Image (tube, rainbow, N blue to C red):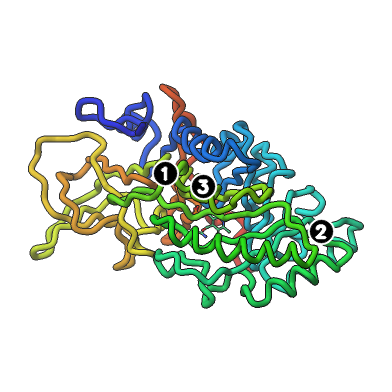
Amino acid sequence: MDHFLYREERLFAEECDVAGLAAEHGTPLYVYSRATLERHWHAFDGAVASHPHLICYAVKANSNLAVLNVLARLGSGFDIVSGGELSRVLEAGGDPAKVVFSGVGKTVAEMELALNTGIMCFNLESGAELELLNEVAGRLGKVAPVSLRVNPDVDAGTHPYISTGLKENKFGIPMEEAEALFARAAALPNLAVKGVDCHIGSQLTELKPFLDAMDRMLALIDRLAEQGIVIEHFDVGGGLGVTYNGETPPHPDVYAAAILEKLNGRPLKLIFEPGRAIAANAGIFVTQVLYTKDNGDKRFVIVDGAMNDLIRPSLYGAWQNIIPAVKTNEPTTRCDVVGPVCETGDFLGKDRELAAGSGDLLVVRSAGAYGFTMASNYNTRPRAAELMVDGDKAYVVREREKLSQLWQGEQLLP
Ligand SMILES: Cc1ncc(COP(=O)(O)O)c(C=O)c1O
Ligand SMILES: N[C@@H](CCCC[NH3+])C(=O)O
């Protein structure tokens, strides 16, 4: 069930009137729905209930402490890609024993933090990283639990910037090197091989690439077993897509059933790293129209939200639905919804049919993932406030940034 629905002509987030939230908290504004986050998490967790598993929510999608805390309370694990994300998980009450650490460029300081915190597993992405982690763990008198992220070389059929499982991408270890590196990891005194990991890309809307990757990864797991390297868990990564514009990605039930079928009774614990599928449609971005202007046949609706707040349209040409917070009977016009940032690429949507005049509120849907986490201060724009609604209550989960915070730490010359 969608928790962002119109009642008469007004859009609600759960039981809260979106225009009312904007009047109280200002714009631009992110609004998240707790019920939706929980429903999406349970959809994943429930889909694999029959099999040992752990859902490790990908923190990069939306790392607000309140979001992490809501998921931690459900028992979620977390997929992190930096020491900063690990610190956020801890701050939000997440369990380090349910954390997997992905990413191609872990630093010594990040390895130390993760080892001292006692995370569940390091997803290693290169031979060099493997040697360094062994050294760092040795120095701390610890044994690091590891899995190797293997690049299965499958085409995820997604945007080239968010495809990660092809040979030409920087992620993971090439399949041809995997067995030798697993043998090396198993032989090192301060590493303990726990798992095999892959992640082939984001916003996948078909099952086939996932299943192709699984075939290759399971064949690898079987070859490793023949060499006496026992794998306890298989981390299938994240990447399940969502509906932005009529896409029909498989429901977690269908996705999980297909994965379990491929597993074919192998006693492997499954780890999932969904980010977008949990957070994207649990959030909206609310922005107010400043001006409209017509340049020849082109109408621009200039809003107070911009690419610095929500970069997906500019960066990937991503399409996210834009709807009014309050519907009117005014005639609609075809327009580009653009922000105040000094870049031609600063748009939230192009060629949209909207009735939008100065002062009106527009809502960008599916903004709960890779929205605020990718925001910047470009053009010295303070980052938006974030709210979480829970029924008829709305909580400020991040205050709007103050201008003075933007130059904190900057110094004039003497
Ligand atoms: C290693 C890893 N795991 C999980 C995710 C989460 O992906 P998604 O938000 O598409 O589920 C990503 C991002 O694509 C990732 O790089
Ligand atoms: N940030 C991207 C997805 C990249 C996923 C991170 N590995 C997006 O908004 O679609």
Q: Nearer the viewer, residue 267 or 179?
A: 267
- C-alpha separation, residue under disc 1 versus residue under disc 2: 34 Å
Indicate the quadrant containing the N terminus: top left, top right, bottom left or bottom right. top left
Looking at marks 3 and 2 on the same chain, the residue that comes earlier in the sequence is marked by: 3
Q: Mark 3 points at which residue?
A: 62
| Amino acid under disc 3 | Asn
Instruction: Residue 37 in the image: state x and y as whole percent.
Output: 48, 36
Residue at left 44%, top 65%?
156
Looking at marks 1 and 2 on the same chain, the residue that comes earlier in the sequence is marked by: 2
Q: Name the residue under label 2.
A: 192
Instruction: Residue 342 in the image: state x and y as whole percent.
Output: 33, 65
Q: Are the residues at dot 1 and dot 2 in contact (C-beta closer than 8 Å)? A: no
Q: Nearer the viewer, residue 351 or 77?
A: 77
- C-alpha separation, residue under disc 1 versus residue under disc 3: 21 Å
| Amino acid under disc 2 | Ala
Q: Determine whether the residue tagged by mark 2 lies in a helix, strand or loop.
A: strand
Looking at marks 1 and 3 on the same chain, the residue that comes earlier in the sequence is marked by: 3
Q: Name the residue under label 1.
A: 251
Q: Determine whether the residue tagged by mark 1 lies in a helix, strand or loop.
A: loop
Residue 203 visible at all: no
Determine the residue located farthest toward the top in the rendered image.
392
Instruction: Residue 50 in the image: state x and y as whole percent.
Output: 59, 37
User: Please, is residue 155 above or below residue 282 in the view?
Assistant: below
| Amino acid under disc 1 | His
Q: Determine whether the residue tagged by mark 3 lies in a helix, strand or loop.
A: loop
Residue at left 67%, top 60%?
196
The number of callouts visible is: 3
Instruction: Residue 353 in the image: state x and y as whole percent.
Output: 15, 50
